[in-house]
């Protein structure tokens, strides 16, 4: 009886306070700058991977969602890199489920690739450290390397495969800041972040952004250490706008916001004037992440519920990184 090469993983999405935009190395996904994030405890992907000589070809199914050929190929290509490490050529069956809509800016590629990496490596009996798993996940999707370690995480940009790796700065229970995810649209974004990253260099503002980065990272880490919420979240908001300035001014221009995103951004600034301590951050999608604390949560939620454009609210605390689970999807 041959051994069963099967494993499952649950991996969170993460929200970056200092964003990753642009790559020094497109193949290794070595980023232009270091980034800082936290894992979200309520948004995750579960993936089961099985390798077997019985399978004639690789297959990938995303439960309750259609997968495009491009997505399938990305999964298979990533499996190839993990198979190469294990020196095994068996084909794989992969099944995943997201507990949120994919490709709307909620970083499904981060949780998806982290879950795939950890499950596939375990199924192939590879004994890898968290750092090795983070490097491997990065090859599948840059931001997924930050979904491997626990809690608050820094992805050190580095210069090559070895040095570009994410590590935990603090565990999830270090600081209870909240990320209220507001879904205002469930349309898929029309330009993937992979294409977006490759355009970063066409913005005249990328060099300015990169020059400011070391100082910005230093400040954010200081506010994190001091647990100074207003300074921390305000800097995160400015940072998101800075990244979007690069996106908007790239050629062709990348405008990821929808009218609803802008409405929410303006509301957040108004609510702040009314005394609710809330800040926004946005990735490449139509959805918006609101940073706040427990004491302001009820006020914020009731304000959000009064807005017609708000379809769903998901309140996240800092979460753990990717981990193996016993229950398989098939
Ligand atoms: O890892 P990717 O290719 O999905 O890029 C993610 C980029 C942003 O979400 C916009 C920023 C970030 O650091 O998460």
Image (cartoon, helix red, strand yellow):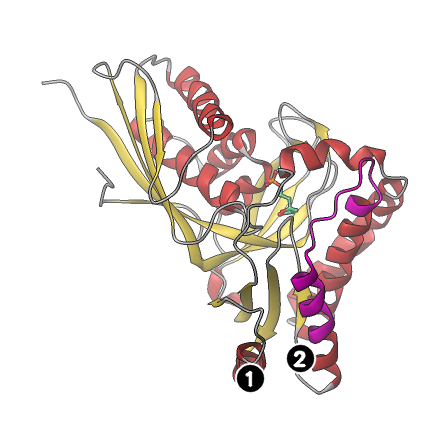
Q: Quadrant of residue 189?
A: top right
Question: First in sequence: mark 1 or mark 2?
Answer: 2
Q: SS at mark 1?
A: helix
Residue 228 visible? The answer is: no
Q: Which residue is mark 2?
A: 277
| Residue nearest the observer in this picture, 63 or 237 | 63
Residue 10 position in % (x across, y down): 36, 47
Quarter holding the C terminus is: top left
Tell me which residue sits at (32%, 16%) in the image.
57
Residue 85 visible? The answer is: yes
Marks 1 and 2 in Cβ contact (< 8 Å): yes
Q: Which residue is mark 1?
A: 295
Ligand 1, what quadrant?
Answer: top right
Q: Which residues are magenta?
A: 247-268
Residue 256 position in % (x across, y down): 69, 49
- Spatial CA distance of label 1 from label 2 is 9 Å
């Amino acid at each position: 009886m041959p051994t069963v090469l099967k494993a499952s993983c649950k991996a969170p999405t993460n929200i970056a306070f200092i964003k990753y935009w642009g790559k020094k190395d497109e193949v290794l996904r070595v980023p232009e700058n270091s980034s800082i994030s936290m894992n979200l405890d309520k948004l995750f992907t579960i993936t089961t991977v099985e390798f077997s000589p019985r399978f004639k070809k690789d297959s990938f199914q995303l439960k309750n969602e259609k997968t495009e050929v491009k997505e399938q190929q990305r999964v298979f290509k990533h499996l190839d890199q993990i198979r190469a490490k294990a020196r095994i050529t068996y084909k794989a069956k992969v099944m995943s489920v997201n507990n949120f809509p994919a490709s709307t800016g909620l970083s499904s590629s981060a949780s998806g690739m982290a879950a795939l990496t950890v499950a596939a490596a375990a199924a192939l009996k590879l004994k890898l450290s968290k750092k090795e798993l983070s490097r491997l996940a990065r090859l599948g999707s840059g931001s997924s390397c930050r979904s491997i370690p626990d809690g608050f995480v820094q992805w050190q940009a580095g210069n090559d495969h070895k040095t570009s790796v994410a590590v935990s700065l603090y565990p999830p229970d270090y600081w209870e800041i909240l990320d209220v995810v507001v879904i205002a649209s469930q349309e898929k974004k029309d330009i993937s972040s992979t294409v977006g990253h490759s355009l970063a260099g066409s913005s005249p503002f990328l060099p300015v952004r990169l020059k400011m980065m070391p100082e910005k990272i230093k400040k954010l880490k200081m506010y994190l250490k001091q647990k100074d919420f207003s300074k921390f979240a305000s800097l995160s908001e400015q940072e998101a706008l800075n990244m979007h300035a690069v996106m908007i001014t790239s050629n062709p221009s990348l405008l990821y916001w929808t009218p609803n995103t802008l409405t929410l951004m303006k509301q957040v600034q108004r609510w702040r004037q009314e005394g609710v301590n809330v800040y926004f951050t946005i990735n490449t999608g139509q959805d918006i992440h609101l940073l706040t604390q427990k004491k302001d949560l009820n006020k914020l939620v009731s304000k959000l519920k009064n807005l017609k454009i708000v379809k769903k609210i998901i309140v996240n605390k800092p979460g753990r990184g990717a981990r193996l689970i016993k229950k398989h999807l098939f």
